[in-house]
């Protein structure tokens, strides 16, 4: 029953996000047709939609209006999807499978995959500026600040650069790298939800910081212990690319323990929200159970 409820909630927001994205890509006049196909292929392809879910959960927890959370939910998923397209390129992680399908560049070629990523990235900011809803200009500007800081040179791109440079060899540096590469966007999801609700809550940022790190450790474990079919991306790619990971530095058992501790800390930061924090708690539990 409890699992049913979690599944239903994540499903409702996944479907909502995908309908909105579909509207912006499939039902738009994007030209040329190959570009449009590569955009749709890269984003309407079965992702879990964790970041939009966090936007909705955070915004609704603080009394935000559902319609005002649509633009940031879509924008962050577009940014995340662009990062996956570029991450899979031969010059980066060189992965030929993503979300269970051949990655964008293997279908459309590297040049179009780079352009698809660029297109998704810029569309994200256009949607924040223009999506019809009653967000104020100040809220939209705040969202642009949050998303650009988290995805750009003080966030995800910096984390990816550290990763590509391959110099990290200890736990502190690995944590910094992962906070930038993966954590920044997860924390930004919660911040975008707060901006949509026009409320600020430090507890929610603490929640996001902790589940963000737990998410990455779990990603490392899944890459080590799962299989390609379940993951929808090449299993063992970290070892192939000689990436340093948490299980390598801590061992699998301690990594699992760390995920539980971080999730406990995250949940404790929601106490003051009472029942309003139920959806955020559900997201944390959903992430603990995820298999891909
Ligand atoms: C600027 C050329 C250029 C490239 C940037 C920044 C970047 C490329 C890549 C970085 C990001 C990256 C791939 C981080 C890993 C984060 C991660 C754990 C992704 C998987 O997220 P899930 O599990 O995936 O939410 P789904 O498929 O469910 O959306």
Image (spheres, rainbow, N blue to C red):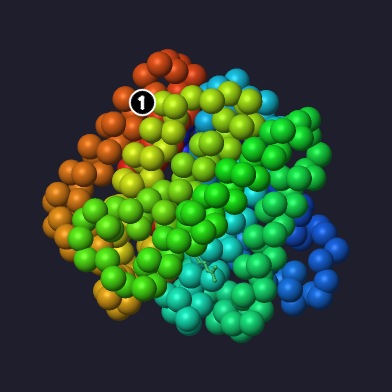
Question: Residue most toward the right?
Answer: 29
Q: Quadrant of the C terminus?
A: bottom left
- Locate residue 240, reporting x and y percent: 30, 78
- Locate residue 274, reporting x and y percent: 42, 15
- The one nearer the camera, 250 or 152, is 152
- Locate residue 23, reporting x and y percent: 76, 52
- Locate residue 285, reporting x and y percent: 36, 36
Residue at 65 percent of width and 60 percent of height: 121
Question: Residue most toward the front?
Answer: 154
Give the side of residue 224 with respect to residue 47, left or right.
Answer: left
Tell me, yes or no, if residue 47 can be seen here. Answer: no
Residue at 48 percent of width and 73 percent of height: 88
Tell me, yes or no, if residue 265 can be seen here. Answer: yes
Give the side of residue 216 with respect to residue 158, left or right.
Answer: left
Q: Secondary structure at mark 1?
A: loop
Residue at 29 percent of width and 53 percent of height: 175
Q: Residues within 10 Å of mark 1 (few under 14, many from 20)?
A: some
Locate residue 283: give its quadrant: top left
Locate residue 82: give its quadrant: bottom right
Compared to residue 174, the image places residue 288 above or below, namely above
Give the side of residue 36 with respect to residue 245, left or right.
Answer: right
Compared to residue 216, the image places residue 116 above or below, namely below
Compared to residue 240, the image places residue 184 above or below, namely above
Q: Quadrant of the N terminus?
A: top left
- The one nearer the camera, 209 or 240, is 209
Residue at 41 percent of width and 54 percent of height: 180
Give the side of residue 22 with respect to residue 164, left or right.
Answer: right
- The one nearer the camera, 134 or 13, is 134
Residue bearing mark 1: 269
How many numbered circles does the render carry? Answer: 1
């Amino acid at each position: 029953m409890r699992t049913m409820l979690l599944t239903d909630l994540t499903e409702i927001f996944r479907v909502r996000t995908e309908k909105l994205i579909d509207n912006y890509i499939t039902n738009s006049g994007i030209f040329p047709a190959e570009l449009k196909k590569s955009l749709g292929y890269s984003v309407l392809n079965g992702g879990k939609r964790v970041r939009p879910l966090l936007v909705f959960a955070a915004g609704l927890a603080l009394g935000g209006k559902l319609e005002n959370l649509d633009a940031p939910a879509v924008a962050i998923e577009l940014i995340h999807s662009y990062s996956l397209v570029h991450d899979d390129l031969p010059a980066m992680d060189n992965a030929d499978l993503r979300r269970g399908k051949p990655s964008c560049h293997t279908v459309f070629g590297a040049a179009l995959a780079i352009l698809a990523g660029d297109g998704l990235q810029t569309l994200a900011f256009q949607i924040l500026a223009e999506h019809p809803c009653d967000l104020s200009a100040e809220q939209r500007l705040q969202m642009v600040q949050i998303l650009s800081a988290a995805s750009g040179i003080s966030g995800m791109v910096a984390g990816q650069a550290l990763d590509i440079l391959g110099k990290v060899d200890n736990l502190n540096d690995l944590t910094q790298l992962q906070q930038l590469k993966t954590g920044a966007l997860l924390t930004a999801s919660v911040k975008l939800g707060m901006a949509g609700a026009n409320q600020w809550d430090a507890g929610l940022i603490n929640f996001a910081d902790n589940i963000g790190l737990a998410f990455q450790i779990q990603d490392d474990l899944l890459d080590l212990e799962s299989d390609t079919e379940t993951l929808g991306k090449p299993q063992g790619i970290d070892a192939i690319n000689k990436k340093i990971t948490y299980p390598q530095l801590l061992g699998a058992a301690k990594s699992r323990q760390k995920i539980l501790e971080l999730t406990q800390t995250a949940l404790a930061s929601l106490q003051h929200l009472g029942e309003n924090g139920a959806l955020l708690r559900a997201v944390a539990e959903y992430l603990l159970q995820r298999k891909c």
